[in-house]
Structures are given as structure tokens and as C-alpha cells.
């Protein structure tokens, strides 16, 4: 199965990416277990977290049912080290063609942050597996609907930033394919039990958005 197929399968199961900014290796296994038990299959450790490569290693080894990735990947030189740690997703707040090329070379799925149609189409031409609409605080559901009118339906759009259970349905109705969830799910000091409770709330909100 190619990385694109694996990513598509994980998105089909539950298209929510857990953004674990600030997580440390001591917390990662329990938090990973809580997320996988809640049905989440996409886990991201931003590189500005403490010891991110170690957390990626632990999650990749432990959460075999999930795809683990690194976030805040800004330089092509970072892609090889996260790949060696076990990451298979390369997630960024921006689009960088050099990062895209290195991710493709290593067989990883690249999910860059974009804000405009020009950035979106440039990222797709470079092989992006999905597009992170970031920051979502600047991209309203109306803006997502306008972008969806020109971006092919097959392209996965993931608003990230300020997403909570109360606004997911409006983004979904506008054409969002899923979401990245950060501090509303996890921030340093959040227990695994609290993560699981939040994960289930977001999962329920996503499922309700499908029938709305």
C-alpha cells in the first residue's frame, strides 16, 4: 500500500489530525494510546516540541494502527531525520517546494499549509497529499466554500486553527474534508484521560457534521 493509500485510509476512518504541540516523550505513549482507542489514526508531533524525534519514535513504534507525522517542518534538511524516526507524514504551516520534493523522494505524505488558491495549486503541483488551510481563523467557512469551487473535489482540505466542536459542521458544509486539532485536544500538562475525553467529543462532532 502506498503512502497515499495509507493516508487516504486513515482519513476515511476519521479525518482528524491530532496536533500534539508541546508533547514530550514521557507523555507520548499514553496520549497515543488514548487517541488510537478513540478512533484517531493521524498523529502529529510538531518539531518545536521537546525531544520531538524521540516522541515520534515512541508513537510510531507503539501506534501501529496510526500514521505518525512531524509538524512545523520548515526545512528540507529536517525531512530525512523525521523519516528515520518513523514519521510518514510531513506537515507544515507553509508550502516549501524543497520540503515537498524531499518528502516525495522518501515516500512520505506532504501536507503543507496554504491560505490562497495560488498557494493551493502550487502545493498540489508539487505533490501535496492534502492541503492544510492555515490559519483557519483567517479562512472562514465562506472562504472555504469559495476555494472548494475551484479546487477539485478529490483534494482533501483540512482547516487548522481555532477549530472546536461548535464550528466543525459549518466548515464541513462548506467543503472541508477534515480538520487538524491542536490545543483544544492537547497542550502540555493535559492527561491522557483528558485527551481521550476531548478526542471523543471531536469524533462525535465530526460524525454529527456528516448528517447535518
Image (cartoon, rainbow, N blue to C red):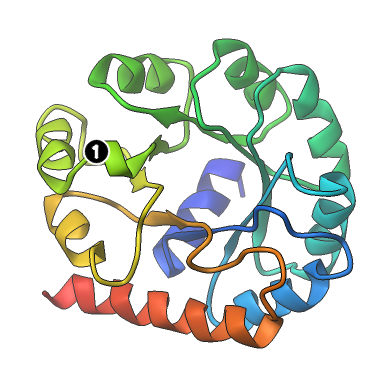
At 87% from the left and 38% from the top, the residue drawn is 84
For mark 1, does the 10 Å Cα neighbourhood hold few (<14), some (14 to 19), or many (20 or more) residues? Answer: some
Name the side, left or right, on which 50 lies relative to 153.
Answer: right
Picture mark count: 1
At 63% from the left and 19% from the top, the residue drawn is 99
Of residue 105 and residue 36, the one placed in the foreground of this image is 36
Of residue 63 and residue 47, the one placed in the foreground of this image is 47
At 70% from the left and 64% from the top, the residue drawn is 188
Q: Quadrant of the C terminus?
A: bottom left
At 38% from the left and 38% from the top, the residue drawn is 135
Could you tell me if residue 208 is visible in this image? yes
Q: Is residue 37 above or below residue 5?
A: below
Of residue 180 and residue 183, the one placed in the foreground of this image is 183
**Looking at the picture, how far across and down is residue 97, in whole percent?**
55, 12
Name the side, left or right, on which 119 lies relative to 89.
Answer: left
Kindly identify which residue carries mark 1: 139
- Tell me which corner region of the image, top left, top right, bottom left or bottom right, holds residue 100: top right
Of residue 8 and residue 35, the one placed in the foreground of this image is 35
**Looking at the picture, how far across and down is residue 182, in whole percent?**
52, 57
Name the side, left or right, on which 41 lies relative to 133.
Answer: right
Could you tell me if residue 156 is visible in this image? no
**Looking at the picture, how far across and down is residue 183, in whole percent?**
53, 61
- Given the current orientation, which residue lies at the most extreme front position? 189
Amino acid at each position: 500500500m502506498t503512502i497515499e493509500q495509507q493516508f487516504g485510509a486513515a482519513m476515511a476512518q476519521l479525518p482528524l489530525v491530532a496536533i500534539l504541540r508541546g508533547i514530550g516523550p514521557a507523555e507520548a505513549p499514553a496520549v497515543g494510546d488514548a487517541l488510537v482507542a478513540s478512533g484517531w489514526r493521524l498523529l502529529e508531533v510538531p518539531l518545536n516540541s521537546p525531544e520531538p524525534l524521540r516522541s515520534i519514535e515512541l508513537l510510531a513504534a507503539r501506534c501501529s494502527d496510526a500514521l505518525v507525522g512531524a509538524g512545523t517542518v520548515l526545512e528540507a534538511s529536517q525531512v530525512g531525520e523525521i523519516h528515520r524516526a518513523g514519521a510518514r507524514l510531513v506537515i507544515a504551516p507553509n508550502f516549501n517546494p524543497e520540503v515537498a520534493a524531499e518528502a516525495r523522494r522518501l515516500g512520505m505524505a506532504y501536507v503543507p499549509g496554504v491560505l490562497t488558491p495560488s498557494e493551493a495549486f502550487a502545493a498540489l503541483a508539487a505533490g501535496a497529499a492534502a492541503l492544510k488551510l492555515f490559519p483557519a481563523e483567517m479562512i472562514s467557512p465562506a472562504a472555504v466554500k469559495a476555494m472548494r469551487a475551484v479546487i477539485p473535489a478529490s483534494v482533501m482540505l483540512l482547516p487548522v486553527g481555532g477549530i472546536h466542536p461548535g464550528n466543525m459542521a459549518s466548515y464541513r458544509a462548506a467543503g472541508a474534508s477534515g480538520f487538524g486539532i491542536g490545543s483544544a485536544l492537547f497542550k502540555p500538562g493535559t492527561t491522557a484521560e483528558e485527551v481521550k475525553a476531548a478526542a471523543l467529543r471531536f469524533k462525535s462532532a465530526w460524525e454529527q457534521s456528516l448528517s447535518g
